[in-house]
Each structure stands twice: as C-alpha cells, then as structure tokens.
Image: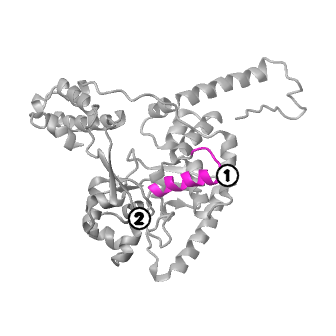
Amino acid sequence: MLLRILPAIGHLKLVDIRPAHLNALYANLAEVGIRRDGQKAIPKIEIAPILKDRGMTRAGLANAAGVSATTITAITQGKRVNLSVAESVSNTIGEPLESLFTIESNATPLSVKTILEHHRLCSTILRQAEKEMIVQYNAAAKATPPKLPQTEAECFQPEEVASIRDALEREPLKWKMLTHLLLITGCRRGEIAGLSWDRIDWDNRQIKIDRASLYSRTIGIYEDTTKTSTTRFIKLPMETMALLREYRLWYMELQMMNGDKWENSGYLFVKENGSPMHPDSITDWMGKFANRHGLPRINPHKFRHTMASLLYFSGADAVAVSKRLGHAKVSTTQNIYAHFIAQADEQAAESIADAILRQPKKPVFTSNENIVKLAF
C-alpha cells in the first residue's frame, strides 16, 4: 500500500499532512489505471510438456523461478497469474514471454474496501505520531474516506443446509469434517485451516481458536493471530466430537501409510503428506463440490453467516453470537447481522401472538405440559 501512498504524500512532513491531502489520495486511488497488478498473464499453451522436454519438475521450476509450487500448479491449470510471475517463469524455462502467455490489462478501479485499507494504514501511522507528540492531531481521523456499501450477509436456508449435509456423506471424510466445523463453529476459513490437534479439548468438548493459517505470495503459507488478535473457546456438540474421533483415526492411518515421508505439521487438515494445506484450496474444493452436487454457490464465509442466523433465530443474543464469531466488538456483530436480528424479532413477536392472542386451531395446553413451539 505504501507504493501507492508515498508518491502522493510521501514528500510531506507528518506535521504538514492535512485531511485534504488524504482526501485527494483517496480520490486518486479510485481512478482507473491505478492498479499495480493491472496486467495479468494467461497461459496460452500447456506448460507441462515443455517441462517434460527440459527434464524439469514443477517443484524445480518453482524454486528456480522464485515462486510457490501452488503458483506453478495454477499455471499448468491455465489460470491467470501476475505478469511478474509469468516473466520469471518464462525466463527460467528459456522461452519468450509472448510464446507462453497472453497478456491482458486490468483497468478496473480499486475497490472501496481496498481504498479503506489504505486509509486505515495512514490512520495507524498518524495515530502513532500523535501518541509520540510528533503531530498535534491525526489528520486521517478528520479525513473523509469512501464509505463501504452495506450489503446483507448471505446465508444458506435450512433446506440448503440439509442438502449440503446429505451431499457430504458421499465425499471424503477430510472434507466432510472440515465443512462440518465451518458450519458448527462459524470460524473463518483461515482459523479452520490453522486449527491444530493440540487446540482440541476432548474432555470439555471445545476447541481453542487463537491463530489462523494464511498465504502470501512472498512468504507462502504462514501462521498468524486471528483477524481480531483474540482467543476464544468454542463449545462443540457431541455429534461433532464423535465425527472428530472418527476423523482422528483416519488421520492416524494416513500418517502410518506415509511413514518417513510424513511431515508432522500438527494441523487437523493437511495435504496427503501431512504438510500445511493452502487456505485457498478450501474455497476451490467447495466450488467444485457445489458443482458436483448441483448445490447453490458455496464459500466458507457463507457458513459463518449461516451459523449466526441460526443462533439469532434460536433466540441467542448479540453478545453470545459475537463471542462465538470472535468479533472484537458486539456492535460489529449487530451491524453485520442487523437484518437477521430484525427478522428474528419479528418472528418472536408473531410467536408470542400465536401463543397468547390468537385462537389456536387445536389445544395448546395438555394436562401435564405447556407446549410452545418456535420453528426456524
């Protein structure tokens, strides 16, 4: 982000930066052609036969070109990559760039979310300067960054959840377990990818969420704190614990089959040799899973929204939902799920009216019990 920020305000002393300078920066970032990654490269021929002719492996090409093995796999699958990556691969193979790739330009303006990330970075720097009394005030706090459009969180309907659950019965146990945890816990994709066996409390039926597995093109797969840098414990139902035990037996068998080739990373969800799994592979698998079974579009975050909606409709309050989701503030939860809260409150009002004010079609009270049913 500094590569975009410094040309605009990097020549100014911190004390001279005004809100107007930052507003001009945000306006510039919204213009067409500002992207550094404005050009992408698309493989025009199959790379695998070329590697075979040169006696090269994918891993060897990745090491020589200074890119990840996942990137080389993406190229062999015909996927878009950054122009710089394509140039490194072409130079390593010894073929002209234009003979291996088709170059396309991306003039799409930066998203509002990306511009806001630049604003937050400026604000963080200036807030520290204010704390150290280098500047009198944080200019970013008085600037006017663009507002992120409010969109309603998408979630699965109960019948869709049932269809997904049924389809998972025909899928490998690893993916059944992973998808099950996404729905039951409401965890973020990286938090599930970064979950390790020592974070499972078998006696108290809970898991500890305090880190996430992430990916960077320059670093590769790495581990970091959760998005809000918080630690939370999530209780699990008995059915989930039973599935975890079944999965642990499968995991141990996989480890024994690999023998000395096994990489003991300690993560629950790993590659076939035990090494850390790329977080993006979760999203990729779910897209293919949905297509195989004729299901609606699936992404990991949609499970998170689904769990939150189910909690609200079951009567949970915002504090309980926020705690399970790991939001730093309850207000964040309330803002994201405002429409769920409103719908749940409306349903609760109708349920109370059914029970107290409206004439039931059949007796509500029996001789021994008081039956009140709330259905989602």
- For the question of whether residue 132 can be seen, the reply is no
Is 291 covered by the magenta stretch?
Answer: yes
Q: Are marks 1 and 2 in contact (CB under 8 Å)?
A: no
Q: Position of residue 239 (x, y in %)?
A: 67, 56
Q: Give the class, few, some or many, for how many residues have Cα within 10 Å of label 2's Cα (few <14, many ≥20).
A: few
Q: Is residue 144 above or below residue 52?
A: above
- Identified by mark 2, the residue type is Glu
- For the question of whether residue 370 can be seen, the reply is yes
**Residue depicted at x 45% and y 31%:** 331
Q: How is the image coloured?
A: one colour
**Residue depicted at x 62% and y 54%:** 292
Q: Is residue 63 above or below residue 17?
A: below
- Identified by mark 1, the residue type is Arg
Foreground: 259 or 61?
Answer: 61
Instruction: Look at the magenta stretch and give its main secondary structure.
Output: helix
> Callout 1: helix, strand or loop?
helix
To which residue does mark 2 refer?
A: 46
Specify the quadrant of the image occupied by residue 81. Answer: bottom left
Q: Give the class, few, some or many, for how many residues have Cα within 10 Å of label 1's Cα (few <14, many ≥20).
A: some
Mark 2 or mark 1, which is nearer the start of the sequence? 2
Q: Nearer the viewer, mark 1 or mark 2?
A: 2
Q: Residue furthest bottom?
A: 260
Give the number of callouts: 2
Is 267 covered by the magenta stretch?
Answer: no
**Residue depicted at x 9% and y 36%:** 11
Span shown in magenta? 280-297
Foreground: 7 or 307?
Answer: 7
Checking the image for residue 165, the label placed there is: 1
Position of 358 with respect to 174 (left or right) is right
> Callout 2: helix, strand or loop?
loop
Q: Position of residue 216 (x, y in %)?
A: 33, 55
Position of 15 with respect to 242 (left or right) is left
